[in-house]
Image (cartoon, rainbow, N blue to C red):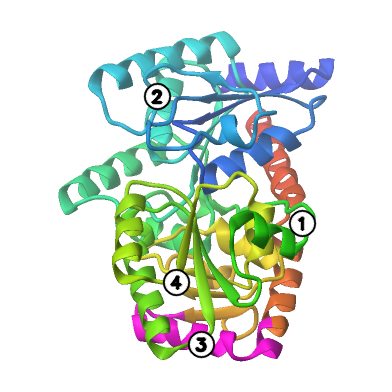
Amino acid sequence: MGEKLREDYEVSLDKKTPIRVMRIIARMNVGGPAVQVSGLMRGFSSTEFDHRLYTGYCAADESDYLETVATDVKAIRIEGFGRRVSLGGDIRAFTTLVREVRKFKPHVIHTHTAKAGFLGRIASIISLQPSIRVHTFHGHLLNGYFGSFKRLLVVIAEKILAIFTDQLLAVGEKVRQDLLNAGVGKKEKFGLMPPGLVINKLPAKDESLKSFGLSNSRLQCAFIGRITQIKRPDRFLDVVSEVKKRGIDLDFFMAGDGELLEGCRKRISEQDLPVTVLGWQSDIQKVLSAADIVVLTSDNEGTPLSLIQAGMAGLPVVTTNVGSVPEIVLDGVTGIITDLDIQEIANALEKLATDKALRERLGLAAQEFTLANFGVQRLVHDHEELYKKLLASQAKS
């Protein structure tokens, strides 16, 4: 199969035909992986690459990023592909992927997130198509998502699949190290690929506040992200309660959706907490322009895009010390990193709320740091160069 790939790649180079890339992700629900994949689909050179996206469908309680934000990104939809594990649906998705691999004959198959990585890489093997296989781990797969037995099965599966994968990528060093410590992959095969984003010009702050019904006479702290257990919205509301108790001049809003949203609404109403629930918002620029501070209270993260977006908007952040957060937030320089402690998070928010100079200093430093290190152009360039390098190396072997 290596000989066939080498011949195919050499023909592609000789004829100046595009390198065929098959990008697979189980679903494009609103979140970090969807943002990254959309950036790649928009940014790749159309003359050098024939770049196609294969994905499934979001669940009823999820927002589809392709339908709400990245409406310009085209995708080939795979029936049965999605969040839910379903024997019938997964078999249908798998057989479709095998058929699509054989039809497209990609030089590179790049899978994103766990389910797509499992079905996509096996489909690549079964299809007998000599493609380069790349897989990206977008978060801390082994922490917080599965019970001990399921975690063991996931580790075994990832260890086996890593053997048949040419390049493993992690969005942060902590993500990579956790997987290596679990025995997934070899260090020489495991690369880093930090996120890459673009933030458009923010609208006027007063206009954003008015459109959301937020006060322009009080500071606004934003919780941005999925309202799910791993993000710990309950901890966020505990912090809000503590801030209210201390009499700190700070209001809050939540921008996101998820299965815990209604429970949060109920608690906010019952406890009369100073929180406005915006639900999911497609215009992240407007959300950021309404905020003075961004807070993250998660138990587990990969490399959270909301913190990168906040930094690009010039906003200071308060965040729990989880995942690869320290790789994108410099404690005391671009934001404040805390333990998973309500009092400590509240202390950090009080510090920022009562010190305008500190907010401005951290926000400016965050903007300079994130723009320099997490731009979408870098993400696209690094992927393009990686594919060329892998194919050239395969052609020589």
* Residue 298 coordinates in the image, percent (x, y): 40, 65
Left or right of 240 in this view: 35: right
Looking at the rendered structure, the secondary structure element under dot 1 is: loop
Which residue is tagged 3?
350
Q: Say if residue 216 shows up in the picture.
A: yes
Sequence-first tag of 2 and 3: 2
* Residue 203, disc: 1
Mark found first going from the N terminus, 1 or 2: 2
Q: Nearer the viewer, residue 234 or 150?
A: 234
Gap in Å between the C-alphas at discs 1 and 2? 37 Å
Judge from the rendering whether residue 87 lies leftward or rightward of residue 262; answer left or right: left
The nearer-to-camera label among 1 and 2 is 1
State the CA–CA distance, disc 4 to disc 2. 40 Å
> Could you tell me the amino acid type at mark 4?
Pro
Label 4 SS: loop
Identify whether 377 is placed above or below 313.
above
Q: Residue at x 44, y 74 (%)?
A: 321
Task: Measure the alpha-carbon separation of dots 3 and 1.
Answer: 27 Å
Question: Viewer-nearest of labels 1 and 4?
Answer: 4
Looking at marks 4 and 2 on the same chain, the residue that comes earlier in the sequence is marked by 2
Which disc, if any, is residue 274?
4
Q: Residues within 10 Å of mark 1 (few under 14, many from 20)?
A: some
Q: Amino acid at mark 3?
A: Glu
Q: Position of residue 48 (x, y in %)?
A: 79, 27
Look at the image and give the residue range highlighted in magenta. 338-359
Measured in 3D between alpha carbons, the distance from the residue under mark 3 to the one under mark 4, in whole angstroms, is: 15 Å
> For the residue marked with disc 1, what is the amino acid?
Pro
Label drawn at residue 81: 2
**Nearer to us: label 2 or label 3:** 3
Q: Residue type at mark 2?
A: Phe
Above-or-below relation of 145 to 85? below
